[in-house]
């Protein structure tokens, strides 16, 4: 357990050394060193007895410019003394999104640098400043959303302050999963699924503007388990779905909701006749919400993920199967079984050609959508694989000149506390040509699609592959990043984020990114010193006039 009770340590490097004895603050790759930049955690005093019953997950949320108000008020448009002092103080204190002129980029693909106007944002948003109002909070910036115990914590990714700027507590159940819609034009953009099966949708900006510790303006779905009383296990927005989202449950069912419909809409579905077969049932009334139920498997669905174009939905579960569905046709496209045990996590490549899975067999499996089967096994973890992700910001040193991706970089984390980075070059991988009767398979290098046996038929689930039939790959990097088992990782343009089950997050800067940030920080510090002088003169002038 990382000790955070006495974590009043000013610098990120000393904090890392104090909290993580024996762990290195960097790891090497062919591109250079990834350096531990800073950490995010949660105030231990805010944790209740329920801590430890849930596993922390992290979501990145990039909020863009706040829409201009239709009827601006005089107080908000004029530069009053109190507003001016608060604004200058926020810039002087350097707390909040945009306080450092960085272009941190989240997994949602946002790339805009934070403007100076957003520096006003976080003043009064931290738990220690709840007495202040957030009237000037515009919410613009990049945030980390994490669940720990009975709370959701929101942290400012662009600030080195390790504590969250906002916490939301749930009295009856624990939050276990969440998702942010970066493309939401208005209204609710954040989903939260609870251990009780309840689901909430809220506006992230509205939560940041409120100083309380309860959800505000929330829509409540599946209230008190009215539709399904089993635990929410995964939740995601439908890409391009105009407010539709999917919730997976521990009983093997998924439900499709629409945020624009009444959350309390009555939904009744037909009885599931065969628990072993996939089936889809639609609600009987047009005003019902959820609008559809997908019965996927008998055991728990552990994770779900859409391809980036929204065409396919991948699910992994306790029964050890990856299932890939054609979402619009509501049909099973392909899938197959793990080598051993449950599958815990899955992730798509940006081009939709490959799916990563990880689970209780300690393997990272690479599935090909073209061949509809496993094309590589990653061996390197010593325990269950709990998180996988492609690095969409990494570019291969050499390309084939056609514009197609010929090499992929991806990462995985596990309960062995390790972060592993992998390079997958499909044209170089050794793949089985064929299996001789009673003998070992023969091998060849080259494109897997030209050498592999015929692709599996559409709509069928493949049995577990033989260990002799699947090409093996080894990790490029293996680094112990936390003291506790890990639960997830996220790649951004400037960093890699790792999170452990206890809720501690580490930000590892990519090679070269730290130097760029240091230069920007120095520039900002010189500017803030001038603002500090200006602030002092303004305060002095105001008191003299009084």
Image (cartoon, rainbow, N blue to C red):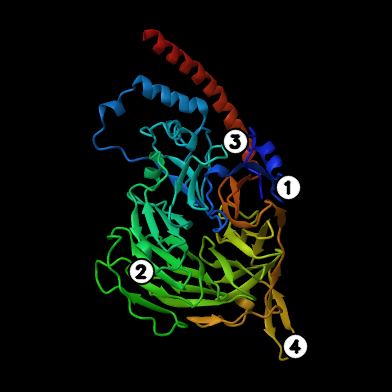
User: Reading the chain from its start, which is encountered first: label 3 or label 4?
Assistant: 4
The structure residue drawn at horizontal position 42% and vertical position 44%, both measured from the top left corner, is 213
Residue matched to label 3? 517
Q: In the rendering, at what x and y percent does residue 229 appear?
A: 41, 68
Q: Residue at x 43, y 85 (%)?
A: 274
Q: CA distance from mark 4 to mark 1?
A: 46 Å
**In the visual, does 121 lie left or right of 353?**
left
Q: Secondary structure at mark 3?
A: helix
| Residue of label 2 | 227
Q: Are marks 3 and 2 in contact (CB under 8 Å)?
A: no
Is residue 447 shown to the viewer in this render?
no
Q: Nearer the viewer, mark 4 or mark 1?
A: 1
Q: CA distance from mark 4 to mark 2?
A: 52 Å
Q: Residue furthest top?
A: 544
Q: Is residue 252 above or below residue 167?
A: below
How much space separates mark 3 and mark 1, taking CA atoms?
23 Å
Residue 343 at x, y = what percent? 58, 70
Which quarter of the figure has residue 426? bottom right
Q: Earlier in the sequence, mark 3 or mark 1?
A: 1
Q: Considering the numbered disc 4 on the image, is that residue within a helix, a strand or a loop? A: loop
Question: Which dot, 3 or 2, sits closer to the camera?
Answer: 2
Reading the image, the residue beneath label 4 is 439
Q: Determine the image quadrant of residue 539.
A: top left
| Nearest to N terminus: mark 3 or mark 2 | 2
Q: CA separation, marks 1 and 2?
A: 46 Å
Q: What crowding class fits label 3: few (fewer than 14 Cα within 10 Å), some (14-19), or many (20 or more)?
A: some
Is tag 1's residue or tag 2's residue first in the polypeptide sequence?
1
Q: Position of residue 246 (x, y in %)?
A: 41, 64
């Amino acid at each position: 357990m990382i000790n955070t009770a006495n974590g009043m340590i000013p610098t990120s490097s000393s904090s890392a050394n104090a909290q993580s004895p024996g762990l290195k603050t960097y790891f090497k790759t062919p591109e250079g060193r990834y350096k531990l930049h800073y950490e995010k955690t949660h105030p231990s005093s805010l944790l209740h007895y329920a801590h430890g019953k849930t596993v922390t997950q992290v979501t990145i949320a990039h909020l863009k410019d706040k829409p201009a108000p239709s009827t601006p008020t005089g107080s908000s448009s004029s530069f009053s003394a109190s507003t001016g002092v608060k604004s200058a103080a926020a810039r002087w204190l350097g707390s909040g999104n945009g306080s450092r002129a960085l272009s941190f980029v989240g997994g949602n693909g946002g790339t805009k640098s934070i403007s100076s106007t957003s520096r006003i944002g976080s003043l009064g948003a931290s738990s220690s400043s709840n007495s202040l109002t957030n009237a000037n909070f515009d919410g613009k910036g990049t945030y980390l959303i994490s669940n720990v115990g009975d709370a959701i914590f929101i942290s400012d990714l662009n600030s080195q302050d390790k504590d969250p700027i906002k916490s939301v507590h749930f009295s009856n159940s624990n939050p276990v999963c969440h998702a942010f819609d970066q493309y939401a034009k208005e209204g609710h953009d954040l989903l939260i699924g609870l251990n009780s099966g309840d689901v909430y949708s809220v506006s992230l900006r509205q939560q940041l503007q409120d100083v309380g510790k309860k959800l505000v303006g929330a829509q409540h779905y599946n209230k008190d388990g009215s539709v399904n009383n089993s635990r929410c296990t995964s939740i995601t927005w439908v890409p391009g779905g105009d407010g539709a989202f999917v919730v997976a449950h521990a009983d093997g069912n998924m439900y499709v909701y629409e945020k624009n419909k009444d959350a309390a809409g009555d939904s009744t579905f037909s009885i599931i006749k065969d628990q072993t077969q996939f089936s889809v049932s639609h609600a009987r009334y047009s005003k019902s919400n959820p609008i559809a139920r997908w019965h996927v498997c008998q055991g728990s669905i552990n994770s779900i993920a859409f391809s980036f174009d929204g065409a396919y939905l991948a699910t992994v579960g306790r029964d050890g199967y990856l299932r890939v569905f054609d979402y619009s046709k509501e049909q099973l496209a392909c899938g197959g079984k793990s080598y051993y045990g449950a599958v815990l996590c899955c992730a798509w490549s940006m081009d939709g050609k490959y799916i990563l899975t990880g689970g209780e067999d300690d393997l990272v499996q690479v599935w090909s959508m073209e061949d509809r089967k496993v094309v590589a096994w990653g061996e390197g973890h010593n325990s269950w694989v709990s998180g996988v992700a492609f690095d969409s910001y990494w570019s291969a040193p050499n390309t084939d000149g056609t514009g197609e991706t010929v090499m992929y970089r991806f990462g995985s984390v596990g309960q062995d506390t390790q972060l592993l980075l992998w390079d997958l070059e499909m044209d170089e991988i050794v793949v089985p040509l064929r299996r001789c009767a009673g003998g070992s398979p023969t091998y060849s290098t080259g494109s897997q699609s030209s050498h592999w046996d015929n692709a599996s038929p559409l709509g069928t689930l493949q049995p577990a592959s033989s260990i002799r039939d699947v090409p093996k790959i080894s990790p490029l990097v293996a680094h112990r990043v936390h003291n506790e088992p890990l639960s997830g990782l996220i790649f951004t343009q400037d960093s890699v984020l790792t999170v452990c089950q206890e809720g501690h997050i580490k930000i590892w800067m990519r090679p070269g990114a730290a130097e760029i940030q240091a230069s920007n920080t120095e520039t900002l510090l010189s500017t803030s010193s001038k603002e500090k002088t200006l602030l002092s003169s303004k305060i002095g002038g105001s008191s003299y006039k009084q």
